[in-house]
Image (tube, grey):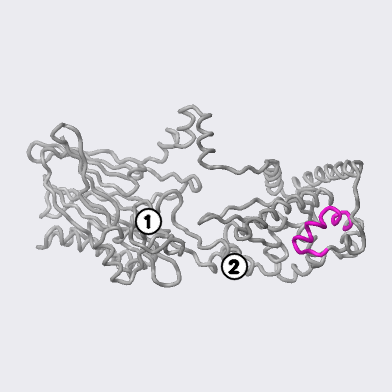
Amino acid sequence: MLLADVICVARKFVIPLVMYRWSSYTKFLSSCDCSYSYSSPVGDCHYFAIAKKWTKLQTHALRIIDKYPHLVHQIHYEAILENKVNVVQHLYDFIGERRFGGIKRQASVLFMKPAEDLINQSKHGRESLKACCLSYQFQNLHRGPSFAKNQNQKWKHQNDGLKEEEIQLIESVAHQIMAKLGYKPHLVGVKTQPTIFSDHDFAIFDAINKKGIERMYEQLKRENPGDFHRRQHQAEILQFQPTLIDESKWIADRFVKLSADEAISSVFLSQEEFAQRLTKEPSQSFDLSNHRHCRFGSATLQGYYPEEQNMINQDRSLIKTLDCKHNARSIWFSVFDGHGPYGHLCSEYVASNIVELFEKHACSSITTHKALEKAHQGAHKILTSNHDIDTTQSGTTAATILLNDNTITVSNVGDSSCILGYREFDNKMGAKLLCKAHTPLRADELERIQRAGGLVMTTGQRDGVEPLHQNWTTDNPPRIWSPSKRKFPGCGFTRSIGDNVAHTLGVTALPETIEHTIGSQDHVLIVATDGVTECEFYLFFSYC
């Protein structure tokens, strides 16, 4: 290769960008920005320091490439300039499928973005546009082919290019690594021998470099304060020595050094943070027959995801006294667990309309069970017909208890729950589910999905990295996938309201319903989304 390639590499970005790929995880070895720009210096400001740092990084990279070639992907800066789409395509081919929808827990919906979507996002996405303001290097990546051609020839410019003594210095330091990376030196080994530098030379280079950095920082402070602070932080990070971390040992060592209170506070929200995320509705009460009393209320806690701390709470609750004359003293209690990009809109919309649909049917001569079925199916129909809400891969569950004096009717769509707390004969409290979750782990639900043409597999099976079987567990649950090439919707439920794509694969909005008479030992009812163990949402009733 021409020296143009070498200078682009050494003066723009350290190449290769080394990536580790292990199982379904991808880890990046941070590249060191020890480059030099003609219009504004970046990082070090003397060619000796630049070449030394570049050579050190590439030595580590080559060691990894030699030992684990199948785990490494190399990206050259000049290749990015010449054909960004092609480079990004190969990068995503190397990384493999990208999953979206779940972070710290099993998400209700999990789907794969195709490479073309990811490439477009890398060019025009929010992070890409934001990065353009940071430095000349990022701005260059948004420029066209003519810029790339000129950039690769810039080192030859008669006035602004490199002098032969500068090329000699760079190649004297870096010629061996350049050869291993496939770059052809311009002078060393071709016309000249590498220069041997003395300690006195090193001291002079270091002094020049330090003064250059000081001038660069002062200039950068004035011209681009944001870029200045970014580079300061980067410089601090680059001072750290790399360490191979055993994650489990690191966690154990870290917590051994903390007191109990410190360990808890480092993992969990503080009382103040918890209170800010918690929303409660005032409790209410009324009398039942047989001299019993019912007290009820609701609460919701915004989920905590360290990477996205302001994630929208998609859960909704509904408590309403029914007006239908055939359901005197009836109260409706529901929770709705939204999922997908617009799950919060879906759960809000269903919560606002489902009771009205139920009352319309309940006031006719049909049974309560039939009225509940029609209400949920009707809610699905009007939600998916609403052009203001995209239900392609968004929807909601619905768990409901209809209380009519001492009789409750339970209906469920999805994987939310209704739980009964009762007092046992030894006066201890027991609990049982009043409804079953709708997931592919149920044989009847699995049969319906497969009959409709849906694929039921774990994410590993869909990726082709896990053998096909049906010995699924809750730790690695199966999901519903389209048989098409695109891997979606990836939903973990078999019934929902909304979710247009999933409903073409056998998912239904038809609820399962049961009836239960409140006994003398029944004391508590809980209607909860599947995150109840993470304190996301619950409704409670207590009887005394």
Residue, disc 1:
108
The local crowd at label 1, few if under 14, some if 14 to 19, many if 20 or more residues have their Cα within 10 Å, is many
Which residue is at the front of the view, 490 or 349?
490
Residue 83 position within the rendered picture, expressed as x and y whole percent measured from the top left: 67, 69
Relative horizontal placement of residue 166, taking residue 425 as reference (left or right): right
Residue 114 position within the rendered picture, expressed as x and y whole percent measured from the top left: 51, 67
Residue 513 position within the rendered picture, expressed as x and y whole percent measured from the top left: 18, 56
| Stretch of the chain drawn in magenta | 167-184
The residue shown at (17%, 39%) is 422
The residue shown at (68%, 65%) is 80
Which residue reaches farthest front? Answer: 67
The local crowd at label 2, few if under 14, some if 14 to 19, many if 20 or more residues have their Cα within 10 Å, is some
Q: CA distance from mark 1 to mark 2?
A: 29 Å
Relative horizontal placement of residue 300, taking residue 465 as reference (left or right): left
Q: Amino acid at mark 2?
A: Gln
- Under circle 2, the secondary element is helix
- Under circle 1, the secondary element is loop
Which residue is at the front of the view, 244 or 358?
244
Residue 486 colored in magenta in the image: no
Q: Main secondary structure of the magenta part?
A: helix
